[in-house]
Image (cartoon, helix red, strand yellow):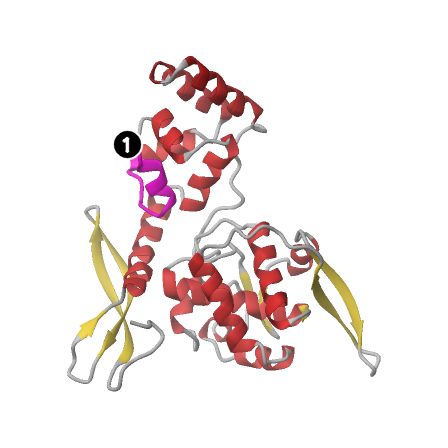
Amino acid sequence: MDNNKLLPGEKYFQEVRTITFRKEEFSYIHTGIIDEEGEMWTTTEMDEANIFQVYNQYRVKHGIPFPDEISGIREHYGLSAAKMAQILGFGINQYRMYEDGEVPSVSNARTIIAAREKDIFMSFVEASKSEMSEQEYLRIKKKVEAAEGDYKPSGQPSEYTGFRSMSLDKIANIVQLIIANIGSTFVTKMNKLLFYADFIHYKKHGYGITGLTYKALPFGPVPEHWGTLYSSLPGIDMEEYVYPSGQSGIQLESVENNENILSVSELATIEKVCKYFAGMNAGEISQTSHLEKGWIENKDNRSSISYQDAFALNYN
């Protein structure tokens, strides 16, 4: 079934529900479909968005790392998920499952957090030495020793970051894809395109893409520290464009293609955003963003917009 198309008589519905997860109760915004006879159901995509809201709350409450950090620690040491599971004493596929979104137990979460520190992780390697061949042990030891210090997460995921750690590489990927689809793009429009990409993905999947925080400023949602952000993106240049009237604006140009690191769902979201907004200029998309609940309720204080407001978006 196409999750974006409804049959005659069907409509989307949202309601606040409570669910028990690991003996604790959490409230979340349940999204589903209802037909004219009152029968309700959900799609796999909706189930994901519903349950991830609960997982996010549980992680924050108990200080459990999010998937970005779990994969980041492994990549920091240059090891496979299977090898990380062996070294930390987990089941053979457990670390990969944590990277894919399964919530670790509190005890396993603390072990993962401890593995941020290079010296502690090396002690885990030493403790698991008997389970490896000498050659494998020396290879892993060399990799860990080559890692640059402790692993340091890039910010704390929260409802204002879409429960993701900020990734400049992902943001650069998105900006390059948008430029490839709709051409050189003014910063004022790109700000809104990133907002819609993150918030539409959160609405569909229960987490954002970039880890950016958005402020409700006069011309619409804007990524925090956007000037520094765009100047820091690999493969992206900022060029001044001067109109015949003498006014000017900053355009973003793609100068090289970075390796794609976006998931299938993230790529699909970017494609959708380009389809929705390709024909709008900066002023038009700004006015469109002024109709969104997240902007309306935060504009007076120029506050950060919670990703939970994604469930009130005018776009799916």
Near mark 1 (Cα within 10 A), the count class, few <14, some 14-19 or many ≥20, is: few
- Residue 31, visible in the rendered structure: yes
Horizontal and vertical percent position of residue 21: 22, 50
The magenta span reads: 91-106
The residue shown at (36%, 18%) is: 128
**Looking at the figure, which quarter contains the C terminus?**
bottom left
Q: Quadrant of residue 46?
A: bottom left
Residue 134 location in percent, x, y?
A: 43, 13
Name the residue located 42 percent from the left edge and 20 percent from the top edge: 125
Residue 50 drawn at (x, y percent): 30, 61
Q: Quadrant of the N terminus?
A: bottom left
- Going by the image, does 201 lie left or right of 289? left
Visible residue check, residue 216: no
Q: Is residue 303 left or right of residue 113?
A: right
Question: Number of labelled discs?
Answer: 1
Q: Quadrant of residue 281?
A: bottom right
User: Is 18 on the left-hand or right-hand side of 224?
Assistant: left
Position in image of residue 251 (x %, y %): 72, 68
Q: Is residue 80 above or below residue 303?
A: above
Q: Nearer the viewer, residue 288 or 90?
A: 90
Q: Residue drawn 80% across and 79% down? A: 243
Q: Is residue 287 above or below residue 169?
A: below
| Amino acid on which the number 1 mark rests in the picture | Gly
- Determine the residue positioned at 49% across, 76% down: 296
Residue receiving disc 1: 91
